[in-house]
Image: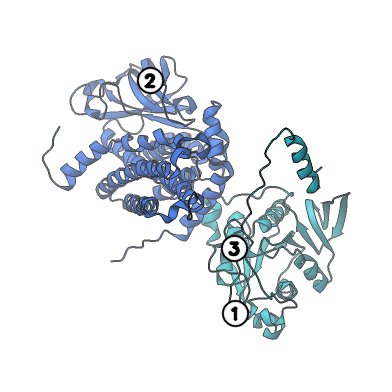
Chain colours: A cyan, B blue
Amino acid sequence: MNIVVCVKYVPDATADRSFDSSDSTVDREGVDGLLSELDEYAVEQALLAAEDGDGEVTVLTVGPADAADAVRKALQMGADKGVHVEDDDIAGSDAVATSLILAKALGTLEYDLVFFGMSSTDGTMGVVPTMVAERLGLPAVTYGSEITVDGSTVTVRRDGDVATETITATAPAVVSVTDQSGEPRYPSFKGIMAAKKKPVEDLTLSDLGIDASEVGLGAAWTKVLSFAPRPPRSAGEIVTDEGDGGTKLAEFLASKKFV
Amino acid sequence: MSTAFAESEERRDLRKAVAELGRKYGRDYFNAAYREGRKTTELWEEAGKLGYLGVAVPEEYGGGGGEIGDLAAVCEELAAAGCPLLLMVVSPAIVGTIIAQYGTDEQKQRWLPGLADGTSTFAFSITEPDAGSNSHKITTTAYRQEDGGWRLSGGKTFISGVDEASQVLVVARTEDHKTGNLKPALFLVPTDAPGFTWQEIPMGIVSPEKQFTLFFDDVVLPSDALIGSEDAGIEQLFAGLNPERIMAASFATGTARLALELATEYAKTRQVWKAPIGAHQAVAHPLAQTHIEIELARLMTQKAAALYAAGDHMGAGEAANMAKYAAGEVVCAAVDRAIQTHGGNGLAEEYGLVQMLAGSRLSRIAPVSREMVLNFVAQFSLGLPKSY
């Protein structure tokens, strides 16, 4: 079973993230980047699925030079090799363009399953897995919280608001996993040391036969017109108890539809 | 000749991975373990499984094959995340180093795999009540038995983590060298050996790791309890003490980083007049000073670790002592300034600083006191006359 995990290099979600004022794209300068935490779950599930067989786990990313850090982290966790698509013309790409690059890159790889995290921690759209599946003509099973691979069949449990579905698909297929699928492992010291010897292939747009006009900020289907920092939290309302404190609290909760 | 002042990518990645693990537990976990009389077993076991405790154990015995600087990075990052593990200073650093360098093949096979994955924990005992910093006054003595084994008699004090350890490495004398300058012999004593008892010393330090007074009442040991050679004792002992100082320095700088982080965050957000208190130089400058002093102490710690890895033990000894001195001073200053930054909140349990107060002073006293380091530097670095 060969598995490709598609991962994204994102600004640390625990830091003060912002946009770049020059082109309204994500500001990568002000905040340290890392492997999207939600993608760590996909790496974990891929490693578990590949553990029993003799297949390989390949980690694939599209991103700037520093995105190599995200690939390295996945290799430290145990993935076998990496592929990094990097090209200046990719900057500012939207989900549609990203899915094109990923699909083309997947075309150069051998795989049975393609794993994704449920969404990125920066864009948080969660549409890329389905777009890639559509481009490749593969079944997509998304938001899996339990993934079982048996032979060429993958069984996925999806926990929805009103029902839990169990869906099976036959490889090749695209699977995205949630943060309920199981805690991702930490890189062991041996994993950290081994990662530097694992192969990482660097690809450009021309390697994939993609014209620069198809991707990047200029080709994006949406445009960020403006952005503003979230306003600071306003001071809370203090209820003075004049014998009717309970009623006032209940009124407040009712006004917010809590009760 | 050039020297790299940046750590290798692997060590930086190790720091990130350990910091992430440390955050999963954090100081709430550490303080709760202390309050509830538990140990930090879950963290120890998970760090062991990931190979973080055994980074410096040779690969052939299941370790990571790294350096003391890697182990020090692990210790520092866990401390910075609020989980300072004192037993890391003792078990993998002192005992692990001594066994790896001087143990017989059999001793290495037997003990190093457990040190590598953290499943075995070792305490280390040198300090005695009547000897203090003067190791030459150590009186714990090993008597050779007719069957080639040993009988150990004596006592130790301020020994960390004996209740968590399976073995204690004991610095003793053999009966042939009962008096005069210390000619130590090192013995591994199982904590369940008949005749070996210990008593907890109630301490004011907030840590799940405890201190003990040990009593060896004619403890009978097999011949292979002697680690390495009877004659190479002092060399073996010193082999473990440089890593101890490097680790103690990292333990302290990690804690100092945490105190500074808490103080900085508070100074940025606490506002009672028109600007956050961090806008006032009386608050900002002590924090900036702390940052500088932490970085200086870390740099000297890294230098000591690099010299040690390069086999320059004399150079490493001087640097390790200086690093331990600087780290001990800065952790005291960092916790002190962080509390002052917080005002009354600094002494409230909720803010997590008051719990660090007594522990920060430990770094100025142990494993070697500030005064003994200054004696060492005065005598060996400056050539001043010996005062004692």
Callout 1 touching callout 2 (CB < 8 Å): no
Q: Crowding near pointer 3: few (<14 within 10 Å), some, many (20+)?
A: some
Provide the secondary structure element on which disc 3 rests. loop
Amino acid type at mark 1: Asp
**Quick one: B89 or B335, which is closer to the camera?**
B335
Provide the secondary structure element on which disc 1 rests. helix
With B169 as the anchor, is A100 left or right in this view? right
Q: CA distance from mark 1 to mark 2?
A: 66 Å
Q: Crowding near pointer 1: few (<14 within 10 Å), some, many (20+)?
A: few
Q: Is disc 1 in the same subunit as disc 2?
A: no
- The residue that label 2 is drawn on is B214
User: Is residue B269 something one can see in this rendering?
Assistant: yes
Callout 2 touching callout 3 (CB < 8 Å): no
Provide the secondary structure element on which disc 2 rests. strand
**Residue B227, located in which quarter of the rendered image?**
top left
Residue B167 at x, y percent in the picture = 44, 27
**Quick one: A31 or A177, which is closer to the camera?**
A31
Q: Is disc 1 in the same subunit as disc 3?
A: yes
Q: Crowding near pointer 2: few (<14 within 10 Å), some, many (20+)?
A: many
Q: CA distance from mark 1 to mark 3?
A: 22 Å
Placement of the N terminus of chain B among the 4 image quadrants: bottom left
Residue B313 at x, y percent in the picture = 28, 47
Callout 1 touching callout 3 (CB < 8 Å): no
- The residue that label 1 is drawn on is A88
Residue A199 at x, y percent in the picture = 58, 66
Amino acid type at mark 3: Arg
Name above or below for residue A246 compared with residue A157. above
Q: In the displayed image of the protein, which residue is found farthest to the front?
A: A242
Which residue is found at the position 71% from the left and 70% from the top?
A109
**Residue B197, located in which quarter of the rendered image?**
top left
- The residue that label 3 is drawn on is A17
With B84 as the anchor, is B385 left or right in this view? left
